[in-house]
């Protein structure tokens, strides 16, 4: 078996591998095609001795879950986790590896590592999230000092982070067009039967999938459902960090829970409008929703609130409707429903298809990999220059 052409990749993430399939999963499954990838999740705590549970995912990614003895301080728990990670590196014989960080809070876990390069994939402004620890911003400053290259999950985030690091590149949400296009072909629609949990719902159906948390404008959804009882609002995804009892209720509001990535095209195939009903607040200022291009690849009209990375390019490019406030949002949904099957709808979809033809997670990963290798070359050259400088000083003193 030939050796991997690239060093192993150690990934520190705040997201469980088996949570919603999103940016980390898309990127790391591609990374695993030509390198060993170890996806290090945040620890589980309990009455057990420290140990590391590693399992090989079907994608080729090795998912590592630290199990840490409960009852220690956060700093001690991270030190214990760092030892497990260092032991993994030694056990696997990883002489050269890169470090990929999603969460600055876990930076101390990498304290014993000596990576070839450190990559910070900043997929959101985590410090703005509900319940974010106060030390997160300082940890991120430390990570900026250590990182050799920084990627951002969107253009709005890039504008903020490029002031903090000299080597930052924007990589907004991409899409597997062929996966979601299953929903739009007539043959696929016939083959993708309506999922049982929405099959009996009448049309029109307006749907959302993703994490249901503090970023959603639940008041908007509740009022939209009240104003339009004939519209069925379908929400697919886990409820996180908010009390489920606070979600608006109604005969036309349907919370279906989390579904797998593979199942999403079947839901989309039977929706009339796809929604991005995000609140406009600090939690959403920097988001770049992965579902925007996914909805469009499925051929479903999109209505979104005024999220920066949806407005540009999707709103400005007349691919999605942008509306803020319940009246405007309701009107945009009604317009999307009325436009169905028209020449205007076909033109809107053609614009979206042209844009999507340039998007691909494969292309995104390849571009990221080029930047990683350039960062490695730069770091190597700087190290050699520094060593040469030290040598000259030593010779001068002889």
Image: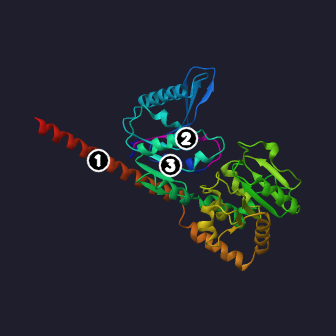
Tell me the residue that label 2 is attached to: 136
- In the structure shown, which secondary structural element does the residue marked by tag 1 occupy? helix
Q: Against 210, is 344 above or below? A: below
Residue 228, placed above or below residue 120: below
Quadrant occupied by the C terminus: top left
Q: Is residue 397 above or below residue 369?
A: above
Of all residues, the one furthest to the left in this rendering is 398
Task: Inspect this view and state whether residue 194 appears.
Answer: no
Quarter of the image with the N terminus is: top left
In the picture of the structure, the residue carrying the numbered disc 3 is: 121
Q: Position of residue 135 (x, y in %)?
A: 55, 38
Mark 1, Cα crowd under 10 Å, few <14 / some 14-19 / many 20+, is few
Which mark lies nearer to you, 3 or 2? 2
Relative placement, left or right, of 201 versus 170 is right
Nearer mark to the viewer, of 2 and 1:
2
Is residue 14 visible from the viewing direction of this image? yes
């Amino acid at each position: 078996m030939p050796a991997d052409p690239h060093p192993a990749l150690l990934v520190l993430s705040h997201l469980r591998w088996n949570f919603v399939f999103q940016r980390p999963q898309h990127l790391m499954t591609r990374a695993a095609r030509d390198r060993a990838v170890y996806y290090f999740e945040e620890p589980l705590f309990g009455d057990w001795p420290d140990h590391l549970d590693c399992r090989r995912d079907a994608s080729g990614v090795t998912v590592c879950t630290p199990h840490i003895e409960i009852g220690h301080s956060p700093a001690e728990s991270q030190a214990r986790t760092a030892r497990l990670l260092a032991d993994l590196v030694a056990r696997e014989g990883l002489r050269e590896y890169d470090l990929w960080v999603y969460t600055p809070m876990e930076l101390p876990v990498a304290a014993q590592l000596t990576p070839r390069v450190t990559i910070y994939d900043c997929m959101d402004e985590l410090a703005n999230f509900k319940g974010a620890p106060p030390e997160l911003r300082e940890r991120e400053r430390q990570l900026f000092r250590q990182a050799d290259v920084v990627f951002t999950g969107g253009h709005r985030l890039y504008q903020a982070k490029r002031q903090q690091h000299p080597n930052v590149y924007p990589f907004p949400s991409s899409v597997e067009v062929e996966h979601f296009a299953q929903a739009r072909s007539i043959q696929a629609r016939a083959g993708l039967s309506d999922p049982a949990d929405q099959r009996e719902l009448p049309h029109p159906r307006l749907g959302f999938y993703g994490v249901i948390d503090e970023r959603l404008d639940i008041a908007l959804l509740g009022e939209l459902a009240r104003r339009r009882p004939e519209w069925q609002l379908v929400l697919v995804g886990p409820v996180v960090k908010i009390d489920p009892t606070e979600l608006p209720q109604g005969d036309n509001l349907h919370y279906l829970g989390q579904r797998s990535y593979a199942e999403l095209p079947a839901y989309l195939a039977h929706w009339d409008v796809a929604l991005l009903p995000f609140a406009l607040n600090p939690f959403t200022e920097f988001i770049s929703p992965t579902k925007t291009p996914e909805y469009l690849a499925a051929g479903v009209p999109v209505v979104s609130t005024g999220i920066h990375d949806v407005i540009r390019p999707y709103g400005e490019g007349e691919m999605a409707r942008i509306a803020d406030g319940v009246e405007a949002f309701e009107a945009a949904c009604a317009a999307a429903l009325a436009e169905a099957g028209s020449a205007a709808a076909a033109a809107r979809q053609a614009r979206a298809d042209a844009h999507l033809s340039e998007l691909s997670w494969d292309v995104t990963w390849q571009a990221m990999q080029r930047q990683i290798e350039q960062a490695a070359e730069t770091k190597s050259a700087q190290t050699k220059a520094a060593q040469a400088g030290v040598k000259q000083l030593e010779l001068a003193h002889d």
